[in-house]
Image (spheres, helix red, strand yellow):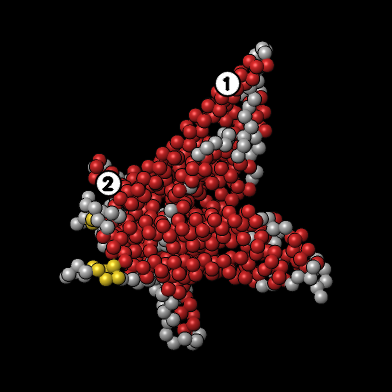
Amino acid sequence: MMVALPEPQSEPKRGAEANAANLAIARKAIEGGARRRRWQLLSPSIIVIGIFGLFPLTITLIYSFLSPGDFGGVTWEFSTDAYVQFLFERDIFDDTLTFSTTYLSIYGRSIGLAFGATVGALLIGFPMAYFIASKPPDQRNLWLFLITLPFWTNLLIRTYAILLIIRDEGIINVSLQGLGIIDAPLGMLYTDGAVFLGLIYSYLPFMVLPLYASLEKLDFKLVEAAYDLYATRFQVLRHIIVPMAKPGIVAGCILVFIPGLGAFITPELLGGGKELMIGNLIALQFGGSRNWPFGSAAALILMVVVMLSLIIYVRYAGKERAHG
Amino acid sequence: MAKPRRMKDLRKQPGFEFLAYTCLFFLYAPIVVLVIFSFNDNRSVVLWTEFSFRWYIEAFDNDGIREATIISLKVAAVATVFSTIFATMAALATTRTPSYRGQTLAYAIINQPLMVPEIVTAVATLAFFTLIKKLTGVSGIGYLMLAHTVFCIPFAYMPIRARLEDMNLTLEQAAADLYATPFQVFRSVTLPLMAPGIVAGAMLAFVVSLDDVIISLLIAGPGETTLPIYILGQIRRGITPEINAVSTLLLGLTVILVAAFFMVGRKK
């Protein structure tokens, strides 16, 4: 973001040397002013987000090494129990630790569901994005609007709308029973499948938009050239379109995976509290279970998983750019 | 062997059009069902009987819904005003001054609320606010407004920054050449040109605040129930057509705002 500095306008007519010195002073003054102005402009956002966004994360880190208070909150006593609890179960009687997969399996399930939803969204979103990109420019805006609209509408309400459709007395079961295809409701709600469907539904626009952004830049002359060289449609897709769309694919996958991993509403409503995901586990520790240190630890472990995915993304995207 | 085809055919991939329409259907079908059944006279959410505004009237008469709506609007209004002001200033700082060290860091901090999973933000904010409340004894709706302001900043920032980046610097430079002071340049050139971006940013911030569930759910104190929290509570208790009506109203408000956002964005 280079912005041209206004050149100092009136130059005192003296020697060339003095002239250069004057220029340097003037430039310094302007730069100094710019710096001051910049920080004045930036400081409200930085201070507010720093104090109320970043600092609380530090508190969470500290809390994760403390002991739980009697009525929620913490007592200021150092303890690594939260992390121990994550991997082991403590026997109530003799305090022995046995390895337990209770919480690991919640993380495993969440990662699996979020990953599955990412792949699902990619499979649906890619044709969608490609289709929009191949439309004439004046029609693209309408399509983009239609895709973006559900994204801005309330996640809770969209999830509730799915719940209405797939529950036992929902429109699918009632129609199928009415038609005599099934005798009993399919029992779709409160299953992993329902959560999976909900996640794809919630985050599909996150996938389509970056995919579209990279496909829109696709030079169809390359496609044409490939056809001229007798490539089949599949070869064109495989060797031209998909590689060109890679930045969009990676960005879309990250944008679906991360919120999917920390999802709260989807598993809460469609999983019915039985199919716990990381988000619900964390909320539960701060709400009903009142074990803040453990909740903090669970939140930080989620952060670590997210950071790792982001690092992989940055590495990967960086390498792609170097190649391209 | 494949003959040279016309450009129009070349762009197409078999089945993609069908999939695109299926995808659109998938996105809208549940919402449409919800909206239709909010006008159903019957208590049932599956069997259509007769068109009626019955559930809307009941929703309007419901004190809980009315109070939750007022709180939601209050919080969203405050969060929108502050986050838009902060985001506008930050956008000017990141696009209208020479590049500098720490720019990436500043950018990362502004976008921090987007990078951290919302549930983590929610519990971290809860922990922090509980600490402040214990130390100062101050409580109230201010905390909720503050939390909303923080996570609305990046949403307001995005369209404003995009607008500023699209804007040509020539007009601002011309004004400066004509001896306008920096403030005059900003007041009469930059601000009017970036106004659509600011309006778009404010609308997004408003929608995002209005829709928030997780952060509000964790940090709202007693008597600070926002509309989404109210709706979530009702869904947990059991499904009533009244909730369909409220959901449809909230949906309608969002659609109007987002449609307006697109209109503002298209006018260049």
What is the quadrant of residue A132 in the picture?
bottom right
Q: Is residue A193 left or right of residue A95?
A: right
Q: Nearer the viewer, residue A107 or B187?
A: A107
Q: In x, y percent, where is residue A80?
A: 27, 57
Q: What amino acid type is highlighted by mark number 1?
A: Ile
Furthest residue toward top: A14
Element under disc 1: helix
Instruction: Name the residue that disc number 2 marks.
Output: B131
Question: How many marks are shown on the rendered structure?
Answer: 2
Up-down: is A31 above or below B251?
Answer: above
Above or below for A6 versus A158: above
Q: Residue at x 54, y 52 (%)?
A: B258
Quadrant containing the C terminus of chain A is bottom right
Q: Amino acid at mark 2?
A: Leu
| Quarter the N terminus of chain A occupies | top right
- Number of the label disc, if any, that sits on residue A25: 1
Residue at (47% x, 51% y) in the render? B114
Kind of element beneath mark 2: helix
Q: Residue at (39%, 46%) from the top-left corner? A: A54
Contact flag, marks 1 and 2 (Cβ < 8 Å):
no
Whole-percent x and y of residue B227?
38, 55
Q: Residues within 10 Å of mark 2 (few under 14, many from 20)?
A: some
Q: Position of residue B77 (x, y in %)?
A: 43, 44
Neighbour tally class for label 1: few under 14, some 14-19, many 20 plus, Cα within 10 Å = few
Q: Please state the chain letter of the residue tagged with numbered disc 2 in the rendered image.
A: B
Q: Is residue B229 rendered to the left or right of residue B99?
A: left
Q: Chain of mark 1?
A: A
